[in-house]
Image (cartoon, rainbow, N blue to C red):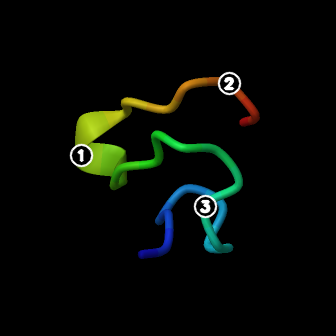
Amino acid sequence: MKCDICGKSPQFGHNVSHSKRHTKRRWV
């Protein structure tokens, strides 16, 4: 499961596609 935002493996527990920006932290 990769995140389309950073294009890297999910660093946090909640990383969903850009469609559902449900990231636990903001690193963009």
Q: Residue 26, percent across and down?
A: 68, 24
What residue sits 72% from the left and 36% below the top? 28
- The 10 Å Cα crowd at callout 2, few under 14, some 14 to 19, many 20 or more, is few
Q: Say whether disc 1 or disc 3 marks the residue closer to the N-terminus.
A: 3
Name the side, left or right, on which 7 lies relative to 27: left
Q: Which residue is mark 2?
A: 26
Q: Say whether disc 2 or disc 3 marks the residue closer to the N-terminus.
A: 3
- Residue type (three-letter) at the residue carrying disc 1: Ser
Q: CA distance from mark 1 to mark 2?
A: 15 Å
- The 10 Å Cα crowd at callout 3, few under 14, some 14 to 19, many 20 or more, is some
What residue sits 33% from the left and 55% below the top? 17
Q: Which residue is mark 1?
A: 19
Q: Residue 14, percent across and down?
A: 46, 40
Q: Using the image, determine if residue 8 lies above or below residue 27.
A: below
The quarter of the picture where residue 9 lies is bottom right
Q: Say whether disc 1 or disc 2 marks the residue closer to the N-terminus.
A: 1
Mark 3 element type: loop
Q: Residue 12, percent across and down?
A: 64, 44
Q: Which residue is mark 3?
A: 10
Q: Using the image, determine if residue 10 lies above or below residue 25.
A: below
Q: CA distance from mark 2 to mark 3?
A: 13 Å
- Residue type (three-letter) at the residue carrying disc 2: Arg
Q: Using the image, determine if residue 16 lies above or below residue 27.
A: below
Q: Residue furthest top?
A: 25
